[in-house]
């Protein structure tokens, strides 16, 4: 016997009332005549079907600008902004599931705080305070398998508790940690029963931070391509960058046919992430998303 669908507005019984472009069954209430859906998620109320959404995801993976993506697909730029946020929302907890193992490299990189409302001024109010106080710290870690994590920690230099708070859940079975001598990392690294190597003091030159430095360069190029993004959304952009990097990092030396197959699998996987997010994100919700505003306003 088919499961009855009751109206979420008044609780009365419903009847079938067609389907959405995504193939989701729509129902109409017999009492209040309002419509509802059998499946309620981020895709349920979009005006475009799965093919358009997947095309858009493909352009995100290829790092195509929002304006070009919207023009090529034939959608409004405002709609493209909204769709990008839906993808970002689906990856909100993506990094929580990443486990780094073996040899990992740890470092920080910084992003300048360019938005006036978040800049810290000197006591006389005539100029901004020292540069370090007007930068955001991004802690990054990467293992030799090519998997990375990257999270915004704070303004200025990250503190020992930031490393523990953000990354304890990402640590798998570790053999060694390679770092650049930053004393703020020591408390975090000493938690783990593994070899700790300061690459700057390694006279053998066997250990370097080149891999994590390369990761930072890739990340900065990614930010540059998206110049103009609102700073409060920075972690959303980083989450997508990490997802993209973790899926593509091993494919650099492979032929284009293999690369296309990998990207197609990423499109399907990201679409499933969006489909399974089980949350309808309205455009107004996107505009009200606070992102990392709390970090931006915190001045220690």
Image (tube, grey):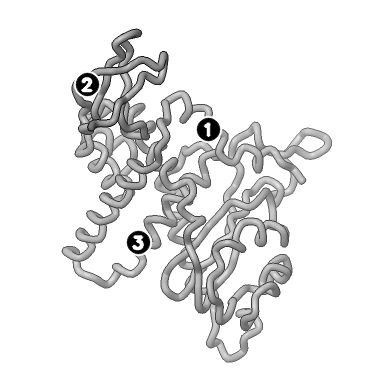
For the view shown, which residue lies furthest in the right direction?
123
Percent coordinates x, y for residue 225 in the rendering: 40, 47
Percent coordinates x, y for residue 70 in the rendering: 27, 33
For the view shown, which residue lies furthest in the front direction?
1
In the displayed structure, 257 sits above or below 39; it is: below
Tell me how far mark 1 sits from mark 3, CA to CA: 27 Å
Residue at point 61% right, 57% down?
A: 166
Label pair 2/3, CB-CB below 8 angstroms: no
| Figure quadrant of residue 72 | top left
Instruction: Give me the disc on residue 247.
Output: 3
Secondary element at image label 2: strand
N-terminal label among 1 and 3: 3
Percent coordinates x, y for residue 60 in the rendering: 32, 46
In the displayed structure, 221 sits above or below 121; it is: below
Tell me how far mark 2 sits from mark 1, CA to CA: 34 Å
How many other residues sit within 10 Å of disc 3, few (<14), some (14-19) or many (≥20)?
some
Label pair 2/1, CB-CB below 8 angstroms: no
Report which residue position mark 1 lands on.
Answer: 289
Residue at point 33% right, 28% down?
A: 79
N-terminal label among 2 and 1: 2
Instruction: Give me the disc on residue 162.
Output: none
């Amino acid at each position: 016997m088919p499961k009855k669908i009751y109206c979420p507005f008044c609780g009365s019984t419903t009847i079938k009332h067609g389907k959405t472009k995504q193939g989701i069954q729509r129902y109409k209430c017999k009492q209040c005549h309002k419509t509802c859906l059998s499946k309620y998620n981020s895709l349920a109320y979009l005006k475009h079907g799965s093919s358009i959404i997947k095309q858009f995801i493909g352009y995100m993976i290829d790092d195509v600008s929002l304006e070009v993506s919207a023009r090529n697909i034939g959608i409004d730029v405002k709609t493209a902004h909204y769709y990008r946020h839906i993808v970002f929302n689906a990856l909100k907890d993506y990094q929580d599931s990443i486990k780094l193992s073996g040899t990992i490299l740890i470092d920080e990189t910084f992003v300048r705080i360019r938005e006036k409302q978040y800049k810290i001024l000197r006591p006389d109010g005539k100029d901004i305070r020292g540069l370090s106080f007007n930068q955001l710290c991004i802690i990054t870690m990467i293992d030799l398998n090519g998997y990375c994590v990257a999270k915004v920690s704070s303004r200025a230099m990250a503190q020992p508790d930031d490393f523990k708070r953000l990354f304890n859940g990402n640590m798998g079975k570790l053999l060694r940690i390679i770092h650049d001598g930053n004393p703020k990392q020591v408390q975090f690294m000493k938690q783990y029963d593994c070899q700790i190597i300061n690459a700057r003091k390694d006279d053998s030159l066997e250990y370097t931070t080149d891999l994590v430095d390369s990761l930072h360069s890739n990340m900065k190029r990614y930010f540059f391509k998206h110049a103009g993004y609102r700073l409060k959304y920075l972690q959303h952009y980083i989450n997508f960058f990490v997802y993209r990097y973790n899926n593509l990092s091993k494919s650099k030396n492979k032929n284009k046919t293999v690369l296309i197959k990998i990207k197609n699998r990423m499109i399907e996987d990201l679409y499933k992430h969006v489909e399974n997010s089980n949350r309808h994100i309205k455009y107004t919700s996107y505009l009200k998303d606070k992102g990392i505003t709390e970090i931006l306003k915190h001045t220690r």
